[in-house]
């Protein structure tokens, strides 16, 4: 006799609920015991103000975790009921509890195996444990194994539910069979809704024209200019971008004014220096995000363009600042204490990340979906193509800015890219991503560590894999643009916000050193399909020149406030005029290797940051330190082949001069041999600092 009675089902359901509650409680207690937060840690008196918010944020995450656990617990109950029906037995409280716990644990293990192989940086970003503990399992995994296991599991569940429903029907319990099938169908539908990818089918495009071309900006955070194949890099990382350069214009020497995301993007989109638009680093108070200068998206929107910004975790600044994008498919400001607290502690964060890197997670917990340090190219790429398809149906021309975090530290990428250039025998802490960058204190401390503390060869291999990953995604986007019939009327720009130092001059990171060009120089390629291409521009240009260039080639007026110059003639192969390049360092997280003892200093990041408005949660530099932080910036001026660097000291300044014709790596200081050149450039440097700071 099959015991499918309302009492037995109620007891089994209570057992399932109890199992989900117990496992969620254990996860919550473990997370509280090892509590961590993302982002820079702030003084204790600041954090105390947000204890209540932190607790509510934690409870919110725990509630979602319980919902996920309950979902899998219900899946376990369906399986238990199916097995019971086939065996002619019943399921009570104990059976429901055991099925719930076993299925939840099995689902975690199954998802963990998928993530460990396909996107292991998800685990690195939210794990307290040494990554070497996961290597024995990782070595046994393969895409084929995971695919076969998924198919076998789906077939087994289908056969089990179908067989159980038939057995119940033949036993005269048709209502139970309907309940079993209906419940299984509902659970499947929920999973399908949560994981279904956006529709990215090409759309026959009507957007734009040759007179009013579309503009597609494709950027990747922290992409070095020297990684392009056309720049001579020995590994063939960028076949798509190289081919794009053969059809368009490649600017070999494009510089950004600051090697940090916020000031660089604001300069690029407004065509002005940081001293003019006022954004000097990433920690900006709410009032300062209202730009007083018209930005590129606002100007194009006023001309009838459809404008959109799409990004993953690195692109929050595209929505934080008042650029004027009409559509923003972006994360919230990542330098916000509310946002960081909503991401929760590591264990809870990892559990949620296993199940919510999908459409449901983007809507339900965007803080987890956009978690910093986690590769998201596989998610962002389809979103970008979906936006292009949507814009293609609109008769208006479009300006779309797609900004990827693909090449940003800690240099994780999806399978197989993180393996593509790495030593297969390497089994150290940076196996899947640059190690020890998930804890705030570690990020700060590591900025000051010497080169010997890093597995540099492995980190460079990871970075190169990220570059190849970005190039492949650019290829998919361009193929989609062509499939929509828009390639012949869309201007394509490939760019970055800054590069990255890998100890070429004693330190690593973004915007820490102005001696080398590794942070300051970015790749810049412009394809205008209406012009003959294949131009290689070796002269000096700046990222502030892009905005006036795009306005001019689209037939729009360039505001007088823009300090960049149009490079439209360069798109026809004409060399640019002699342009001065300025670059400044960003805020130091900690004292950097090689910094002179007498260098102008300020307190550490822990002390200079505050949350001026607890209601908004935005993290900003305290007003009392703003001038000091600006004054302590290292600076660089390049004019032609001469490059002058400036380090402010407690008394005076230290200058160094380099001749880039003979010393592109900036190893030989010629300041003593060329005092007249130093004097000339220093005067221009001081004028720039004094008048614009």
Image (cartoon, rainbow, N blue to C red):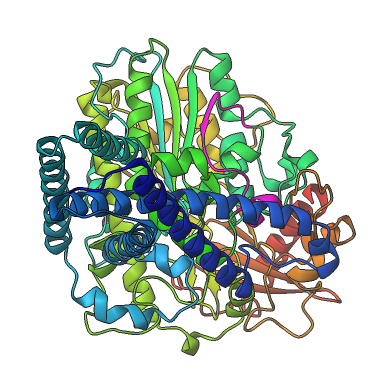
Q: Residue 135 occupies which quadrant of the picture?
A: bottom left
**Residue 317 rendering spot, x and y as whole percentages:** 60, 44
**Residue ranking furthest to the right:** 624
In screen coordinates, is 85 left or right of 588?
Answer: left
Horizontal and vertical percent position of residue 302: 58, 15
Residue interval drawn in magenta: 323-342
**Is residue 250 among what the camera can see?**
no
Q: Nearer the viewer, residue 43 or 152?
A: 152
Please provide percent x and percent y for residue 46: 82, 62
On the rendered structure, is 414 left or right of 52? left
Q: How many marks?
A: 0
Q: Is residue 30 above or below residue 449?
A: above
Judge from the rendering whether residue 39 lies leftward or rightward of residue 640; answer left or right. right
Give the residue displayed 21% in from the left and 51% down from the top.
239
Between 318 and 347, the one nearer to me in the picture: 347
Residue placed most toward the observer, 43 or 493 = 43
**In the figure, 550 relative to 49: above or below?**
above
Question: Residue 416 appears at what percent x and percent y?
Answer: 23, 62
| Residue 339 lies in the magenta-colored region | yes
Farthest residue, direction bottom: 452
Q: Is residue 265 left or right of residue 216?
A: right
Is residue 475 in view from this perspective? yes
Q: Residue furthest top?
A: 395
Is residue 578 positioned above or below 248 on the image?
A: below
> In this view of the protein, which residue sits in the foreground, 608 or 556?
608
For the point 28% across and 84% down, which residue is it? 426
């Amino acid at each position: 006799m099959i015991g499918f009675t309302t009492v037995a089902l109620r007891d089994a359901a209570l057992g399932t609920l109890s199992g989900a509650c117990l496992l969620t409680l254990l996860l919550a207690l473990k997370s509280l015991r090892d509590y961590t937060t993302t982002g820079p840690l702030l003084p204790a008196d600041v954090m105390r103000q947000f204890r209540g918010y932190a607790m509510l944020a934690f409870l919110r995450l725990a509630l979602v975790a319980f919902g996920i656990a309950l979902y899998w617990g219900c899946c376990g109950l369906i399986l238990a009921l199916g097995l019971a029906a086939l065996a002619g037995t019943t399921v009570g409280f104990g059976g429901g509890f055991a099925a719930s716990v076993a299925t939840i644990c099995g689902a975690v293990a199954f998802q963990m195996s998928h993530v460990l192989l396909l996107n292991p940086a998800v685990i690195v970003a939210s794990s307290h444990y040494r990554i070497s503990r996961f290597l024995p399992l990782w070595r046994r995994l393969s895409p084929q194994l995971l695919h076969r296991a998924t198919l076998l599991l789906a077939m087994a569940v289908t056969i089990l539910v179908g067989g159980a429903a038939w057995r119940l029907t033949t036993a005269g319990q048709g209502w139970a069979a309907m309940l079993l099938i209906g419940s299984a169908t509902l659970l499947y539908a929920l999973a399908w809704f949560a994981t279904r990818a956006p529709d990215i089918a090409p759309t026959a495009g009507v957007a734009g024209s040759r007179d009013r071309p579309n503009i597609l900006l494709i950027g990747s955070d922290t992409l070095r200019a020297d990684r392009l194949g056309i720049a001579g890099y020995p590994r063939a990382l960028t076949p798509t971008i190289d081919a794009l350069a053969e059809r368009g214009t490649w600017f070999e020497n494009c510089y950004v004014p600051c090697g940090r995301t916020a000031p660089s993007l604001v300069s690029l989109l407004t065509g002005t220096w940081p001293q003019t638009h006022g954004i000097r680093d990433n920690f900006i108070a709410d009032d300062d995000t209202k730009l007083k200068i018209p930005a590129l998206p606002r100007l194009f929107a006023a001309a009838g363009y459809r404008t959109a910004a799409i990004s993953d975790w690195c692109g929050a600044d595209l929505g934080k600042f008042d650029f004027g994008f009409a559509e923003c498919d972006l994360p919230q400001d990542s330098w916000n204490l509310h946002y960081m607290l909503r991401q929760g502690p590591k264990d809870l964060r990892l559990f949620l990340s296993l199940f919510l890197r999908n459409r449901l997670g983007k809507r339900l917990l965007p803080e987890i979906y956009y978690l910093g340090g986690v590769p998201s190219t596989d998610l962002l790429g389809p979103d970008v193509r979906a936006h292009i398809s949507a814009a293609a149906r609109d008769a208006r021309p479009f300006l779309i800015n797609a900004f990827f975090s693909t090449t940003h530290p800690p240099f994780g990428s999806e399978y197989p890219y993180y393996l593509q250039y790495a030593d297969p025998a390497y089994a150290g802490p940076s196996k899947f991503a640059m190690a020890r960058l998930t804890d705030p204190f570690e990020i700060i401390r590591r900025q000051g560590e010497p080169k010997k503390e890093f597995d540099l060869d492995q980190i460079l291999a990871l970075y190169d894999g990220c570059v190849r990953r970005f190039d492949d995604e650019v290829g998919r986007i361009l193929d989609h643009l062509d499939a929509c019939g828009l390639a012949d009327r869309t201007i394509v720009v490939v760019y970055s916000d800054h590069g990255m130092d890998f100890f070429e001059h004693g330190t690593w990171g973004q915007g820490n050193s102005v001696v080398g060009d590794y942070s300051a120089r970015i790749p810049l390629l412009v394809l205008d399909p209406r012009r003959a291409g294949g131009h290689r521009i070796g002269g000096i240009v700046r990222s502030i020149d892009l905005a006036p260039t795009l306005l001019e080639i689209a037939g729009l007026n360039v505001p007088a406030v823009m300090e960049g110059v149009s490079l439209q003639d360069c798109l026809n192969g004409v060399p640019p005029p002699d342009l001065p390049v300025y670059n400044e360092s960003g805020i130091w997280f900690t004292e950097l290797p090689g910094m002179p003892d007498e260098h102008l200093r300020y307190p550490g990041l822990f002390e200079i940051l505050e949350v001026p408005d607890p209601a908004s949660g935005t993290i900003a530099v305290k007003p009392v330190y703003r001038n000091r932080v600006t004054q302590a910036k290292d600076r660089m001026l390049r004019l032609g082949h001469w490059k002058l660097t400036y380090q402010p000291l407690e008394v005076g300044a230290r200058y160094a001069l380099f001749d880039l014709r003979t010393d592109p790596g900036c190893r030989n200081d010629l300041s003593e041999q060329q005092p007249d050149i130093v004097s000339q450039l220093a005067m221009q440097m001081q004028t720039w600092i004094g008048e614009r700071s």
